Amino acid sequence: MKGNVHSIETFGTVDGPGIRYVIFTQGCLLRCLYCHNADTWEIGKGKVMSTDEIMADFESYLPFIEASGGGITVSGGEPLLQPDFLIDLFRKCKARGIHTTLDTSGGCYSTEESFQQKLAELFQYTDLVLLDLKHIDDQTHKRLVGRSNQNILEFARYLSDHQVPVWVRHVLVPGWTDSREDLERLGDFIRTLNNVQKVEILPYHQLGVYKWKALGYKYQLEDVSPPTPESVELAKSLLTAAKPQATAAIAAVGV
């Protein structure tokens, strides 16, 4: 089985527990204004790699990763655009006892029967989902990422209904995702989910602006500064106060 891969990070420390071998897939349906991987957007591009190639490369890092309690994380782009590739890779990982993590926005979630069947199979081999919840307000979500959040919230409920362990991630963008009302609403939504193990606040940054410029895209948030430590702490308290059993954490890097 082959997939379109943008790049691989062999020593990731912020995309799941322990040291992670992180595969960034190519292709995404969202157009987040703050995206730092805009070069992963185009579908069908990237390097074509087989799951066997990836597993062979992963082997050389396995002793360090296993010692840390880590594993493989597939990020993007949007990995769920390539479900067959994910299923084959994660099946091989589980056969080796390797911890598997999926980093997704759920932006391509569908109730179509064929997609549902693939999800059911995929989550047999998935230990953890990093779920990026961009914004709770649908209209703002459309302005921020170009699409509605309805199927994303539905995907979150699907994960909860099927008891798939989740770490919720929320990028804190001043003026966009940091209002108290929106954070309280998002916290209320998280409270309805019964599978959330952790909530991470990811402070907005501009480390990927150079990619937008190289691609000839206009970056619309150039005047937005990273959030203050105080606003990050407030967001953390608002999102986790509604769900005391969730452990809040501030990630070291942004989106």
Image: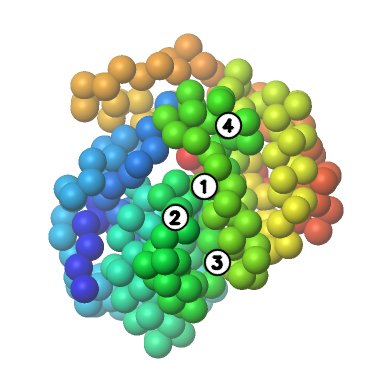
Closer to the eye: label 3 or 2? 2
Q: Please tell me which of labels 1 and 4 falls first in the chain.
A: 4
Q: In 3D space, how far apart are the residues under numbered discs 1 and 2 (Cα atoms)?
A: 7 Å
Tell me the amino acid under the disc marked 4.
Answer: Asp
Q: Position of residue 53 (x, y in %)?
A: 20, 73
Tell me the amino acid under the disc marked 3.
Answer: Leu
**Residue 215 to residue 200: above or below:** above
Element class at badge 3: strand
Instruction: Tell me if mark 1 has few (under 14), some (14-19) or many (20+) residues whose alpha carbon lies within 10 angstroms of its own.
Output: some
Element class at badge 1: helix
Q: Are marks 1 and 4 in contact (CB under 8 Å)?
A: no
Instruction: Tell me if mark 3 has few (under 14), some (14-19) or many (20+) residues whose alpha carbon lies within 10 angstroms of its own.
Output: many
Identify the residue shown where x is 70% and y is 39%: 186
Q: Please tell me which of labels 1 and 2 falls first in the chain.
A: 2
Element class at badge 2: loop
Q: Where, by quadrant of the figure, is residue 207 drawn? A: top left
**Residue that carries the numbered disc 4 in the rendered image:** 138
**For this rendering, which residue is in front, 141 or 171?**
141
Q: In 3D space, how far apart are the residues under numbered discs 3 and 2 (Cα atoms)?
A: 20 Å
Q: Which mark is residue 151?
A: 1
Q: Please tell me which of labels 2 and 4 falls first in the chain.
A: 2
Left or right of 247: which side holds 213? left
